[in-house]
Image: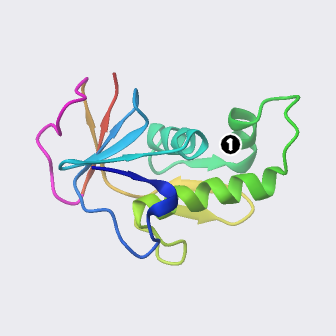
């Protein structure tokens, strides 16, 4: 079963445990695979690389839209964060995963477990956690 971010409602939290698979830009839970768009996935990568630390809006701008890219940065970043939250079933007012620091940036507040190179199945799933799978 595949689900895309545009079809996932905000109020439906993602069932945990979840694995993040970098090569395919997917979140996997059980047999469901949720493919993320490029920008929301890159934001997720940056947040998961430094859980608990602030990823500034300027850092996100520099990573997602390099010099010479003309885009309405504020609108584009807000839309990408909104799509990522929709997939995770997160709420900005009561965050389980992504905390907003107004005018500064975002912080990953969810529980994570790094997992080593595995892409087919979840490695030892732990309830209430998101696993990170890199290949």
First to last magenta residue range: 117-128
Query: Quick one: SS at disc 1?
Result: helix
Residue occupying the point 68% across, 42% down: 60
- The residue pinned by badge 1 equals 60
Q: Could one spot residue 98 in this view of the protein?
A: no
Residue located 33% across and 21% down the image: 135
Residue 17's spot in the image, x, y percent?
Answer: 22, 54
Above or below, 106 relative to 19: below
Left or right of residue 7, residue 39 in this image: right
Relative depth, front residue between 45 and 14 = 14
Q: Is residue 104 left or right of residue 55?
A: right
Looking at the image, can residue 84 be seen?
yes
**Horizontal arrangement in the rendering, residue 34 relative to residue 46 (left or right):** left
Looking at the image, which residue is at 15% across and 37% down? 123
Residue 58 occupies quadrant = top right
For the rendered model, the colour scheme is rainbow
Q: Position of residue 114 (x, y in %)?
A: 28, 36
Query: Up-down: is 94 above or below 107?
Result: below
Give residue 1's position: percent from left, percent from top: 27, 49
Residue 44 percent location from the top left of the image: 50, 45
Q: Main secondary structure of the magenta part?
A: loop
| Residue at the (11%, 41%) spot, across then down | 124
Is 15 covered by the magenta stretch? no
> Would you call the spot at circle 1 few (<14 residues within 10 Å), some (14-19), or many (20 or more)?
many
Residue ranking furthest to the front: 1
């Amino acid at each position: 079963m595949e689900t895309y971010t545009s079809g996932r409602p905000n109020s439906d939290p993602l069932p945990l445990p979840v694995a993040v698979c970098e090569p395919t830009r997917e979140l996997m839970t059980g047999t469901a695979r949720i493919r993320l768009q490029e920008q929301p996935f890159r934001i997720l990568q940056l947040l998961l690389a430094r859980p608990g630390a602030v990823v500034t809006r300027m850092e996100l701008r520099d990573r997602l839209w390099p010099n010479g890219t003309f885009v309405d940065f504020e609108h584009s970043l807000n839309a990408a964060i909104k799509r990522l939250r929709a997939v995770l079933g997160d709420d900005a007012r009561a965050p389980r995963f992504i905390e907003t620091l107004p005018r500064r940036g975002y912080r990953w507040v969810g529980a994570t477990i790094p997992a080593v190179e595995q892409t087919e199945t979840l490695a030892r799933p732990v309830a209430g956690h998101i696993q990170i799978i890199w290949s």
